[in-house]
Amino acid sequence: MYDYAIRFEQDDSAPGVAVFCRDLPELNSYGDDKVHAIGEAVDAIESTLSLYVDQRREIPAASQAQPGERVIHLPAVTVAKIALWNEMVRRDMRKADLCRLLGIAQTQGDRLVDFLHNTKMEAMENALSALGLRLSVNIEAA
């Protein structure tokens, strides 16, 4: 659902590889080569997701990869944050509303939807549960 496909573009006049994502048009990243670019892709996606939070916009689901694209699998905590944020947007909730609901400090609430901050899965499960959602994890071959 949130495994975004990226594409690479190489400019012959400059070294390195540019990275783009159809589903997240605000994303742009760069790597010395494709391997480096893939390594930077998760950070680039999480930074882009932060823009959606700043703009109070729902985060789009990923579409099917097209030929030549590479799928990036996000960490489980990032997917949980996307689910939490999107549910908050659907309910027209602000971070302060979530903090009141959970009985937590503003800084703790901010971190629950901060894609650049590492959050414990336990905290994400609690927040999702307070909104009537349950986190489910599937294991599949890589």
Image (cartoon, rainbow, N blue to C red):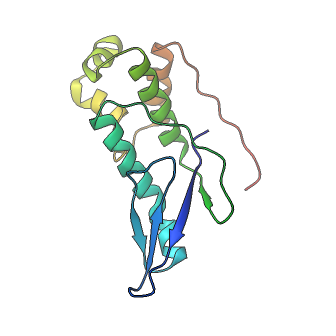
Residue 84 vertical position relative to residue 48 in the rendered view, above or below: above
Count of numbered circles on the image: 0
Residue closest to the eye, 134 or 73: 73
Residue under the image location 53 percent in, 75 percent down = 34
Q: Residue at x 34, y 11 (%)?
A: 101
Quadrant of the image containing the N terminus? top right
Looking at the image, residue 99 lies above or below residue 72: above
User: Could you say which is closer to the camera, residue 122 or residue 30?
Assistant: 30
Answer with the quarter of the image where residue 11 lies. Answer: bottom left
| Residue 37 placement (x, y as % from top left) | 48, 70
The residue at 47%/14% (across/down) is: 131
Q: Nearer the viewer, residue 32 or 118?
A: 32
Report the residue that reaches farthest toward the right: 141
Q: Position of residue 26 (x, y in %)?
A: 37, 51
Above or below 137: residue 47: below
Q: Residue at x 70, y 38 (%)?
A: 138
Q: Quadrant of the C terminus?
A: bottom right
Q: Give coordinates of residue 55: x percent, y percent.
A: 28, 35
Left or right of 54, for residue 36? right
